[in-house]
Amino acid sequence: MLRVALFALMALGLAGFGMVAWLSLHPPPPPPPVVAPIIKISVLATANTLTAGTLMKPDDLETKDVPEAELPTGARRDTPQARAELFGAMVRQTLLAHQVILSGDVMRPGDHGFLAAVLSPGKRATSVGVDIVSGTAGLIWPGDHVDLILTQEIPNDNLGKRVSSETVLEDVRVIAIDQQLVQGTAAGGASGVANAQSRTVTLEVTPEDAERVAVANRLGKLALSVRPVDQTPTPEGRSKTVTYGSDVSKAFTHSAGPGQENEATLHVFSGPNDKEYKF
């Protein structure tokens, strides 16, 4: 029995030595290397292709995630402030869709030479004052095309003709606009007191139309009307119609005083009878 136990121990020893030798010749595979996570930064990019001279609108911007190691110099992180700063900015050179917007790609309102760069040859920049309502409640953006409407009150014995409205300019491009009006919010500084009655919209016009705007500013109240993108100007460039109070409200028909009859009268004679019709 002793001899058997001795042989058994020797066999176990040889087996253990063989296992150690095999493991030394066949080491386990090394653990997979630890890969550092790729950090991405959300930056502003173009949602579609923008040609040089375009004034940027909110729907021209999108978010693009770029690896931090590949972040180009001058890229803007996607923040509400960065978006607001790009609204109305002019594109210096054509940008392709989904291209990261760099600082040198745009010129913002307020930058030196912005108006001179955005104006078409032979055109002038002129500003008009509008309020939140006449400025279409903040829905106008730089780059939109608008009509300029003048409403004025002129002394007239005919009540229906005292208030009139007419289109002074048609199809003019908006090149700059008060930032608070663009965002559609009430203006106000740190104190929260709004200066809601004074907003400025800058239009691109001809030198002659700049003089018309200056006169219209003195005559009465100005309002803006946004035009569809594909609408063409009316013949000769301007509307010649004038709308009076009597064209809008029938109340003027019943408020006319002596000598201001707005109704037409028709006399019908049939033998000795005389009938009168008003319409």
Image (cartoon, rainbow, N blue to C red):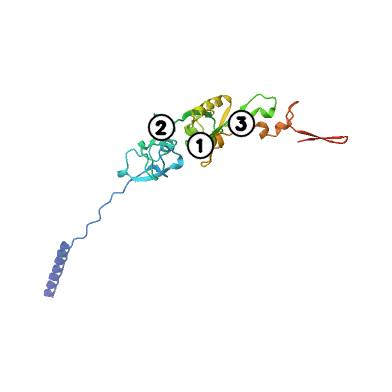
* Amino acid of disc 3: Ser
What residue appears at the point 44 percent right and 42 percent down from the top-left corner? 60
In front: 151, or 67?
151
For residue 117, which numbered disc appears in the image? Answer: 2
Q: Position of residue 248 (x, y in %)?
A: 66, 34
| Disc nearer the start of the sequence (2/3) | 2
Q: CA distance from mark 2 to mark 3?
A: 34 Å
Q: On the rendered image, what quadrant is the C terminus found in?
A: top right
Q: Residues within 10 Å of mark 1 (few under 14, many from 20)?
A: many
Circle 1: element type: strand
Residue 56 image position (x, y, % from top left): 44, 38
Residue 25 location, x and y as percent?
A: 15, 63
- Name the residue that disc number 1 marks: 145
Do we see residue 14 in this rendering?
A: yes
Q: What crowding class fits label 3: few (fewer than 14 Cα within 10 Å), some (14-19), or many (20 or more)?
A: some
The CA distance from mark 3 to mark 1 is 20 Å
**Where, by quadrant of the figure, is residue 266 drawn?**
top right
- How much space separates mark 1 and mark 2, taking CA atoms? 18 Å
Which label number is shown at residue 110?
none
Q: Amino acid at mark 1?
A: His
